[in-house]
Image (cartoon, rainbow, N blue to C red):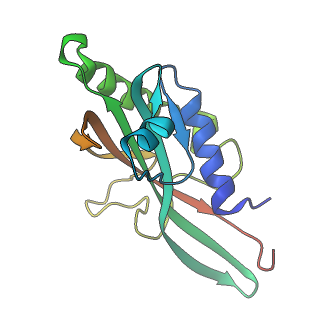
């Protein structure tokens, strides 16, 4: 049964939330006008620890009359409070790898059996890479540091391609 973009984002959230140490997770980008707004939706236990999920593109492919599939590209951004004395760099790097590992599980490869694959055969992030090898699952595209509302954080950008077969007329 097709679940659409918001349903897919919810399944991504469910998988990420099963990883120990993940803070708040939002199925859309959050924006705050003040530092207090930012802390409200990004802090857990007095520390920034949040993930944001959003779709950035969709490719559509017609297979036959009345049958098609869609490949969505989701960006997943993470922010984690920086504190040198606590070696938060190492903690955050391990957290990113644990999240990626969750998407290699059986339930992660099909988002709990709600989509065909997290290795699309077409679209912006297809399973066939330029080198001829297969790409699939959660891709870590950048890890670094950022300043969010005057708060230094570790920051990661992850990309996930998702292929689904929606109904022609939902």
Depth check, front residue: 103 or 26:
26
Residue 58 vs 53, above or below: the answer is below
Residue 75's x, y, as percent? 43, 54
**The N terminus is located in which quarter?**
bottom right
Residue 104 vs 6, above or below: the answer is above
Which residue: 19% across, 11% down? 85
Residue lying at the far bottom of the rendered structure: 65
Which residue: 25% across, 12% down? 86
Residue 72's x, y, as percent? 53, 64
In this picture, residue 122 sits left or right of residue 4 = left
Which residue: 48% across, 51% down? 30
Residue 100 visible, this orientation: no
Residue 51 visible, this orientation: yes
Quarter-of-image position of residue 133: bottom left
Residue 29's x, y, as percent? 48, 54
Residue lying at the far top of the rendered structure: 85
Depth check, front residue: 21 or 8:
21
Residue 108's x, y, as percent? 58, 39
Residue 119 vs 149, above or below: the answer is below
In this picture, residue 54 sits left or right of residue 89 = right
Which residue: 59% across, 41% down? 13
Depth check, front residue: 132 or 24:
24
């Amino acid at each position: 049964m097709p679940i659409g973009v918001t349903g897919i984002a919810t399944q991504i959230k469910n998988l990420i939330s099963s990883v120990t140490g993940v803070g708040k997770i939002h199925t859309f980008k959050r924006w705050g006008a003040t530092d207090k707004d930012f802390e409200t939706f990004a802090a857990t236990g007095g520390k920034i620890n949040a993930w944001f999920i959003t779709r950035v593109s969709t490719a559509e492919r017609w297979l036959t009359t009345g049958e098609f599939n869609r490949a969505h590209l989701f960006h997943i951004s993470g922010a984690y409070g920086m504190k040198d004395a606590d070696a938060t760099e190492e903690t955050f790097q391990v957290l990113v790898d644990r999240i990626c590992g969750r998407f290699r599980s059986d339930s992660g490869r099909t988002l709990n059996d709600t989509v065909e694959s997290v290795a699309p055969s077409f679209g912006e992030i297809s399973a066939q890479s330029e080198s001829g090898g297969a790409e699939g699952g959660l891709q870590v595209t950048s890890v670094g540091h950022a300043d969010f509302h005057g708060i230094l954080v570790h920051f990661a950008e992850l990309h996930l391609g998702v292929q689904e077969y929606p109904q022609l007329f939902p």
